[in-house]
Image (tube, helix red, strand yellow):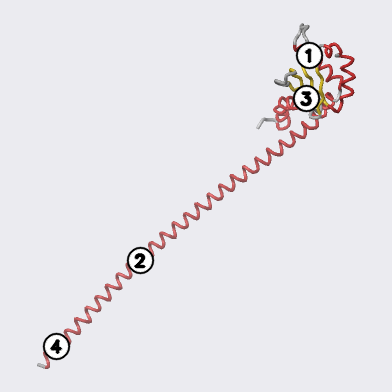
């Protein structure tokens, strides 16, 4: 009886030990599989991070290069513009100012405008002329000599401190004024000169 009990006890022990061993092996295998999966995932995540970092670095490099190119082109364009403006300032403005500083020239221009406003008409002149206020006395003397008949026919001459050179002319009712100031002619010459000036300075247009 005792022998059978001992055999039974040993059997139960062996079966328990075997079962525990199998369970341990199972746990070990599952743990290894999980570790392998985590390792694969970690490697995959690391590869993706590296690829993303490389992509971001390449994009940053490209954007930085493009921005530098744009900035350099803008700086070059600004520099060219400053050179063009400087040449214009040294060539156009002094000449225009010199021409319109001659009150006699402006007076002759006014007379030519009025005579061609209504050519051949003997009617009263319903026009107002605005002239630079800084040369008022000189203009008054010139018009008394050159335009006495026109003044008698109704030509109105006014002076404005807003006009530095040249003149403006229009109907007395104030519907509109046609401007022939030094600034108008300066802008006109610039619009014609600028393309040729850029071509001469830089051999080709931008």
Name the one closer to the observer, 160 or 19.
Answer: 160
Q: CA distance from mark 4 to mark 3?
A: 128 Å
Disc 2 or 1, which lies upstream in sequence?
2
* Direction from residue 9 to residue 61 in the image, left or right: right
Disc 4 or 1, which lies upstream in sequence?
4
- In the rendered structure, find residue 114 and report the number of the disc placed on it: 1
The N terminus lies in quadrant = bottom left
Disc 3 or 2, which lies upstream in sequence?
2
Give the mark toward the camera: 4 or 3: 3
Disc 1 or 3, which lies upstream in sequence?
1
Q: CA distance from mark 2 to mark 1?
A: 100 Å
Report x, y in % for residue 202. Answer: 71, 32
Tell me the residue that label 3 is attached to: 181
Disc 4 or 3, which lies upstream in sequence?
4
Name the one closer to the observer, 177 or 35.
Answer: 177
Label 1: few (<14), some or many (≥20) within 10 Å?
Answer: some
Tell me the residue that label 4 is attached to: 7
Give the mark toward the camera: 3 or 2: 3
Q: Residue at x 79, y 27 (%)?
A: 163
What secondary structure is found at the residue carrying circle 2?
helix
The C terminus lies in quadrant = top right
Give the mark toward the camera: 2 or 1: 1
Tell me the residue that label 2 is attached to: 36
What secondary structure is found at the residue carrying circle 1?
helix
Report x, y in % for residue 112. Answer: 80, 14
Number of marks in the image? 4
């Amino acid at each position: 009886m005792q022998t059978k009990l001992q055999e039974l006890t040993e059997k139960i022990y062996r079966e328990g030990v075997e079962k525990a061993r199998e369970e341990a092996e199972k746990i070990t295998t599952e743990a290894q599989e999980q570790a392998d999966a985590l390792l694969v995932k970690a490697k995959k995540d690391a590869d993706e991070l590296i690829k993303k970092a490389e992509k971001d670095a390449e994009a940053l490099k490209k954007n930085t290069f493009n921005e530098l190119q744009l900035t350099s082109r803008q700086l070059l364009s600004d520099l060219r513009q400053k050179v063009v403006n400087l040449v214009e300032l040294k060539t156009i403005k002094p000449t225009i100012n010199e021409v319109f500083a001659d009150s006699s020239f402006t007076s002759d221009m006014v007379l030519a405008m009025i005579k061609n406003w209504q050519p051949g008409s003997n009617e009263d002149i319903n026009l107002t002329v605005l002239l630079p206020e800084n040369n008022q006395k000189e203009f008054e003397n010139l018009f008394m000599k050159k335009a006495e008949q026109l003044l008698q026919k109704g030509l109105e001459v006014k002076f404005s401190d807003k006009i530095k050179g040249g003149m403006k002319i229009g109907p007395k009712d104030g519907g509109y004024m046609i401007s022939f100031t030094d600034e108008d002619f300066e802008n006109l010459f610039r619009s014609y000169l600028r393309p040729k000036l850029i071509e001469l300075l830089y051999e080709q247009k931008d």
